[in-house]
Structure formats: C-alpha cells, structure tokens
C-alpha cells in the first residue's frame, strides 16, 4: 500500500510517500521505505516579522501544497492513482494552516475513493524514533521530550495510543524562548541556532538567569527568563556590541533553558523508569542540550534516542509512519472508517479528544 502523508500545521509544507507494507516488515530505517520525503519551508517569508504570521502561512500552504504533492509523486515515480491511503495532520497547530492540509486530504481521499487517517502532530513528533532502524528505535515505555518553536512537552508513552503528559510549558515554548531572547540580543529570526553558536564561545556561569520551572514545579515556564534577559539588555546597552559580553550572555541564557529541560526530564526518568528518552523537535539540534541530556541518560542507564535533524523538525515522514502503525494496530476499525469521516477530521477540541491523553493539548 502506498500512503501519501501531508503536514501543514505550521510553516512547513511537507509531503511523504510511504510504502506501508515495506515499512511495517522492515528492520531498516524508514529511509528505505519512503519513496519521497519533501519539506518546503516558509522561513524566509516570516523572517522579517520575527515569527510565523498565521494568515500568511496558511495562504502560502495553499500555493505550495499542490506543488509539493506533485514533486513528491514525481520523486516516488508514481501517479496519484497509485496512492491507496492518505494521512494528514489534523492538530494541534495553526488553524488556517491545518485547514489547508485537511481540506486537501479530504478532497484527495474522496476523489480517489481511498481511506483517510488523521494524525495528531505531537504524537507524530513523539514517534519520530520509529523512523530509525529497528535496533535504534525506543522500546516501550519511553519518554519523549518534544521541544520546538511551537511545543514543549514531556510525554510518557506506555504503548501506541497510551500517553501521559508529564510536563508542558505554561507560556512560551523552549524554541520560542531561544528565538525571543535572540531577538532581544539582535540576532535575527529564528535566533535559536545563532544564539547557540555564540553560546559555544561564552561562559555559562556569567549570569544566573531564572530556571524555567514554575514555583509549584508543574511544567515549564519561559516568560520569566525573557523578562530577565530584556532587563539585562536594557541595563547594558553599551556592552551589547562587545563580542565577549554577547557570547557570555548567550551561554547563560542557553544554560538556563537547557538546565530546566534537563532537570525536569531527569526527575521524570527517575520516577517513571522508562527504557528510553526520545529528544525531538527543532531544539533537539542544540548541542548543549544533547550533551547534558546524553550524560544524564547514561548515568541513569536509559537509551538516548535523537532522530536525524530532518525528522526532528516538522516533516511528513513522522506522520506517514505513525499512520502506518495506526492502520496496522487497528486495521479492522480503520477499514470501516467512513470516507473523509467527520469524526476523525474535525479540527479543534473534538479532534484532540479522539486522541485520549492529547485532549489536554492546546490547539
Ligand atoms: O521544529 P521546528 O523546526 O519548527 C517548529 O517550531 O515547529 O523548530 C524550530 C525551533 C526554533 O525556535 C529554532 O530557534 C529552534 O527550533 N532551534 C534551536 C536550534 N536549532 C533550531 N534552538 C536552540 N539551539 C539550536 N541549535
Ligand atoms: Zn512540530
């Protein structure tokens, strides 16, 4: 079965074509079963605004999606008539952006008379480790730390479909914290990579910024850090252009974000005793976060799984393999799904409610 997966929840238009049987029967990396895996980023469009502009993003998906689908079919060397199932991200994400993907997927499925599988975006990130070869995939139960510009969640995964959210952010996402602090330091958007590059040259203990854990120890909170950085920037305007000062500031900001993520994750590992920790989302590219988490997991004897960067950031491959697993595990129900089922493709709280623990996710 050839499955076409669509991901348009934020500012990446992504489409993959997966050979489902090949993937489910293979012990190799999903690379071997993906006939196409294409991501078109809108980053340049949003950079002048210092963040993703939802309305612009939705309009851009409308233009890009048919082109990216054509490109994926061309790469996979298949015609649209050979596609036998569709998977699409139906939340959480930017509503206008999700609508473009979902409406396109519904029309495709209806026109071709093939089934449609709705996939939760965070669930997709959580299972990104399943894109690796079998020997590297996380074993149940595992913890997943999903950290990107849009999400910061620590999820305990008992099995496919059984999840508990251990911690999530109360305000900004970890990537957003990197980006907002970088913007305050004049490093452009998205500033996470630039900030971490400078941080590598600076002194981590230069300033002690607030650790992003709320007083009652529930979840993460990054807004206090942002305010503290703003204050330092306002009070040291003369020093900001000095390279050493900037590098030290970046290193201190990075350390505050990294240590709060590591502390919470280590506590969860000690309590829940998972077999593995999966680190995913765009912030998984951060060297310091990988280094410290890697060391901690080694101490705890827990496997540390970090998928390649292209599968940590938003992509359709993670949506495709999760849809394949869902089809495999609930094959009868899946066969009975009404075409373009309203139940599975509503946006908003109803969509999340159909995904159990993910009901608590904001959309
Ligand atoms: O997953 P992603 O590509 O997009 C979504 O947010 O969905 O994540 C992008 C985020 C941005 O906030 C970016 O600044 C951050 O990941 N990021 C980093 C690094 N590389 C990307 N943050 C810290 N250090 C990095 N090396
Ligand atoms: Zn994402």
Image: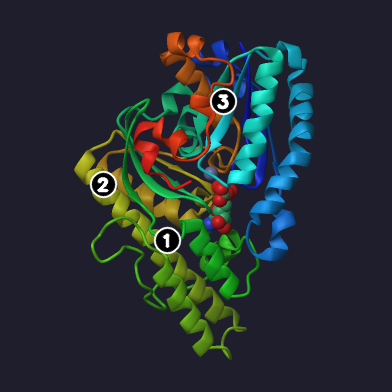
In the picture, the disc for residue 268 is: 2
Task: Describe the element under mark 3 as helix, strand or loop.
Answer: helix
The quarter of the displayed image where residue 86 is located: top right
Q: Is the residue at mark 2 in contact range of ligand 2, meaning its CB lies under 8 Å from it?
A: no
Q: Residue under circle 3?
A: 320
In the rendered image, residue 293, in percent from the top left (x then y), is placed at 37, 50
Snapshot colouring: rainbow
From mark 3 to mark 2, how far is it between C-alphas? 29 Å
In the picture, the disc for residue 35 is: none
Q: Residue furthest front?
A: 342
Mark 2 Cα within 10 Å, few/some/many (few <14, many 20+)? some
User: Looking at the image, is mark 2 or mark 1 nearer the viewer?
Assistant: 1
In terms of sequence position, does the residue under pointer 2 or pointer 1 come before the other?
1
Q: Is the residue at mark 1 in contact range of ligand 1, meaning its CB lies under 8 Å from it?
A: no
Along the viewing direction, whichever of 257 and 61 lies nearer the viewer: 61
User: Looking at the image, is mark 3 or mark 1 nearer the viewer?
Assistant: 1
Q: Residue furthest left?
A: 271
Can residue 18 be seen from the camera position used here? yes
In the rendered image, residue 46, in percent from the top left (x then y), is placed at 70, 58
- Compared across the picture, whether 193 is left or right of 142 comes to right
From mark 2 to mark 1, how far is it between C-alphas? 20 Å
User: Looking at the image, is mark 3 or mark 2 nearer the viewer?
Assistant: 3
Task: Describe the element under mark 2 as helix, strand or loop.
Answer: helix
In the picture, the disc for residue 171 is: 1
In the rendered image, residue 228, in percent from the top left (x then y), is placed at 43, 77
Q: Is residue 224 above or below residue 27?
A: below
In the rendered image, residue 239, in percent from the top left (x then y), is placed at 56, 88
The quarter of the displayed image where residue 353 is located: top left
> Do callouts 3 and 1 mark residues in contact (Cβ within 8 Å)?
no
- Compared across the picture, whether 33 is left or right of 165 comes to right
């Amino acid at each position: 079965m050839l499955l076409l997966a669509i991901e348009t929840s934020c500012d990446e238009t992504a489409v993959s074509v997966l050979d489902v049987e090949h993937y489910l029967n293979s012990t190799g990396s999903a690379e071997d079963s993906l006939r196409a895996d294409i991501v078109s980023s809108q980053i340049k469009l949003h950079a002048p605004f210092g963040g993703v502009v939802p309305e612009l993003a939705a309009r851009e998906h409308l233009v890009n999606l048919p082109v990216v689908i054509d490109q994926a079919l061309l790469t996979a060397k298949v015609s649209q008539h050979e596609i036998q199932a569709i998977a699409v991200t139906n939340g959480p994400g930017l509503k206008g952006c999700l609508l473009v993907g979902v409406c396109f997927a519904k029309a495709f499925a209806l026109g071709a008379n093939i089934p449609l599988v709705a996939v939760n975006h965070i669930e997709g990130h959580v299972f990104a480790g399943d894109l690796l070869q079998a020997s590297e995939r996380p074993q149940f139960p595992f913890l997943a730390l999903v950290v990107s510009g849009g999400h910061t969640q620590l999820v305990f995964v008992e099995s496919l479909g059984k999840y508990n959210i251990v911690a999530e952010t109360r305000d900004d996402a970890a990537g957003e914290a990197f980006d907002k602090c970088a913007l305050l330091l004049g490093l452009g958007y998205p500033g996470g990579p630039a900030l971490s590059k400078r941080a590598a040259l600076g002194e981590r203990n230069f300033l002690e910024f607030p650790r992003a854990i709320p007083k009652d120890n529930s979840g993460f909170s990054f807004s206090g850090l942002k305010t503290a950085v703003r204050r330092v920037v306002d009070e040291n305007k003369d020093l900001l252009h000095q390279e050493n000062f900037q590098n030290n500031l970046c290193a201190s900001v990075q350390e505050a974000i990294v240590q709060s993520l590591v502390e919470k994750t280590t506590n969860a590992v000690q309590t829940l005793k998972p077999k593995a920790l999966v680190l995913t989302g765009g912030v998984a590219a951060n060297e310091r976060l990988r280094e410290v988490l890697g060391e901690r997991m080694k101490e705890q004897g827990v496997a540390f799984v970090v998928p390649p960067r292209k599968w940590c950031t938003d992509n359709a491959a993670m949506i495709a393999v999760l849809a394949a697993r869902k089809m495999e595990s609930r094959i009868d129900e899946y066969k009975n799904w009404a075409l373009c089922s309203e139940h599975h493709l509503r946006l908003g709280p109803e969509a999340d409610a159909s995904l159990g623990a993910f009901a608590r996710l904001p959309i």
